[in-house]
């Protein structure tokens, strides 16, 4: 069973941009695409720790602002890199309100 917590509204996030949510497991970047889809991933590139929330959003991907690694917002996998991935987090919308599934965060924090 999921435990959903409200983290903001769609209008809080610029199209093709991101906002961050501070959690017990670190910063999570919440992205809004040009088509108003929303995704949540860790805000730290595994390559050099770049803030993915400051990257360029194109389609359902974000490019790290430090070294141009491209991450899928859907899967968290780096594309065109030898290895690399970031965690993704489930979101849902109710109208313009955005909710994040806190169940995964609690499980990670308990590790």
Image: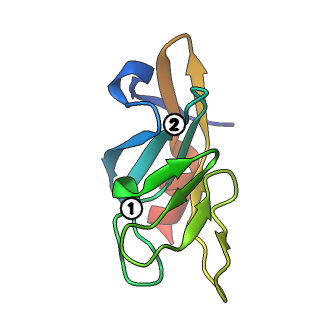
Considering only vertical position in the picture, is 22 above or below 12?
below
Query: In front: 73, or 95?
Result: 73
Q: Which residue is mark 1?
A: 25
Task: Tell whether 26 sits left or right of 103.
Answer: left
- Judge from the rendering whether residue 30 lies leftward or rightward of residue 26; answer left or right: right
Image x and y of residue 88, in percent: 59, 56
- Which residue is farthest top? 95
* Direction left: furthest residue: 22
Q: Quadrant of residue 78?
A: bottom right
**Where 46 falls versus 60 (above or below)?**
below
The location of residue 35, given as percent across then percent down, is 61, 27
For disc 2, the marked residue is: 100
**Residue 95 location, x and y as percent?**
55, 10
Mark number, residue 98: none
Q: Residue furthest bottom?
A: 82
Residue depicted at 44% across the width and 63% down the height: 109
- The structure residue drawn at horizontal position 61% and vertical position 52%, both measured from the top left corner, is 73
Q: How is the image coloured?
A: rainbow
Q: Judge left or right: residue 97 versus residue 33.
A: left
**Quadrant of the frame with the N terminus:** top right
Q: Pick the residue in front: 57 or 27.
A: 57
Q: Position of residue 51 (x, y in %)?
A: 34, 64
Question: Which residue is located at x 57 percent, y 14 percent?
Answer: 94
Residue at (40, 69) in percent of width and height = 44
Q: Secondary structure at mark 2?
A: strand
Of the two numbered discs 2 and 1 on the same chain, state the one appearing first in sequence.
1
Count of marks, rendered view? 2
For the residues marked 2 and 1, what is the alpha-carbon distance in whole angstroms?
14 Å
Helix, strand or loop for disc 1: loop
Label 1 Cα neighbours within 10 Å, binned few <14 / some 14-19 / many ≥20: few
Q: Callout 2 environment at 10 Å: few (<14), some (14 to 19), or many (20+)?
A: many
Is 71 placed above or below 91 here? below
């Amino acid at each position: 069973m999921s435990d959903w917590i409200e983290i903001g509204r769609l209008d809080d996030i610029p199209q093709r941009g991101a906002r961050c949510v501070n959690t017990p497991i670190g910063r999570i970047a919440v992205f809004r695409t040009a088509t108003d889809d929303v995704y949540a991933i860790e805000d730290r590139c595994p390559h050099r720790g770049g803030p993915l929330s400051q990257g360029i959003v194109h389609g359902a991907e974000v490019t790290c602002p430090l070294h141009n690694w491209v991450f899928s917002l859907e899967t968290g996998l780096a594309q065109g890199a030898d290895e690399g991935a970031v965690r993704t987090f489930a979101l849902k919308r109710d109208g313009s309100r955005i909710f994040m599934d806190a169940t995964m965060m609690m499980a990670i924090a308990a590790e």
